[in-house]
Image (cartoon, helix red, strand yellow):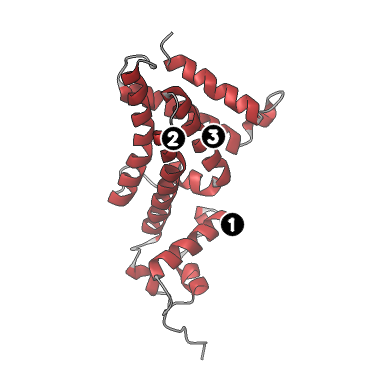
Amino acid sequence: MGAQVQPYHHGNLKQALLDTALEHLRLHGPDKISLRALARDVGVSQTAPYRHFEDKTALLAALATEGFRRLYDASHSTLKAECSAADALQMSGKSYIHFALDNPELYRLMFGPMLSPDDDFPELEEAGGNAFRVIVSLVQRGIDSGEFVNKDPLLVANSTWAMVHGISSLMLDRRFDCVEGGISESVLDESLSLIMIGITVR
């Protein structure tokens, strides 16, 4: 007979599964994650994860939700920064890029094709919305103060996000390695400054 799995007694099983899944994601990417492997590594029965996650897609959605919450935490401090809206938005953009570089597999899961915007995961939708609202709030702050052009704040926020997201993706995929000089921290700062020029009142 095989070894009997001991009942899970210590702590929060759902969080233990998520923590282990994040490690599996970091090491192997989303394709290799399985609820069965998580159960084995956490030390519970193979059916135990299904009490918290209906299937693998639900697990991946929970991981992406955690990612958006971490992204929110990384950029939210800029809302309270005692500086201009432009500086705060630039700081937020830099936090976004460094989050992507520090968490490449999680970032790719959050924005990649494995999770569809049409999937019904309310917590994921809320977490993603909260992270995006950091950008919208900073843009609105700049419009209200007269720093930014008086355009639809969602249009400005989407345009800014698209550029920062593009930089993040290109850096993750090492596409700047193909460009003479690459992209250093100082060049990154200059790139973000150029983004600000496009929305700043002159």
Q: Residue at x 39, y 70 (%)?
A: 12
Q: Looking at the picture, does residue 68 appear above or below residue 165?
A: below
* Label 1 close to label 3 by CB (< 8 Å): no
Label 1 vs label 2: CA separation? 31 Å
Write down the residue under mark 3. Answer: 168
Please give the label number shown on residue 78. 2
Is 178 left, or right, of 90 in this rendering? right
- In this rendering, the answer to whether 9 lies above or below 15 is below
Name which residue type carries label 1.
Leu
Mark 1 against mark 2, which lies toward the viewer? 2
- Spatial separation of the CA atoms under disc 1 and disc 3: 20 Å
In this rendering, which labeled residue sits more in front, label 2 or label 3?
2
Res 18 quadrant in image: bottom left
In the rendered structure, the answer to whether residue 65 lies left or right of residue 167 reads left
Q: In the rendered structure, which amino acid carries the disc numbered 3?
A: Ser
Q: Where is the C terminus found, in terms of image quarters? A: top left
Which residue occupies 30% across, 20% down? 152
Q: Earlier in the sequence, mark 1 or mark 3?
A: 1
The residue furthest right is: 180
Q: Nearer the viewer, residue 91 or 33?
A: 91
Q: Secondary structure at mark 2?
A: helix
- Distance Cα–Cα, label 2 vs label 3: 19 Å
Q: What residue does disc 1 label?
A: 27
Q: Residues within 10 Å of mark 3 (few under 14, many from 20)?
A: many
Residue that sits furthest to the top in the current view = 202
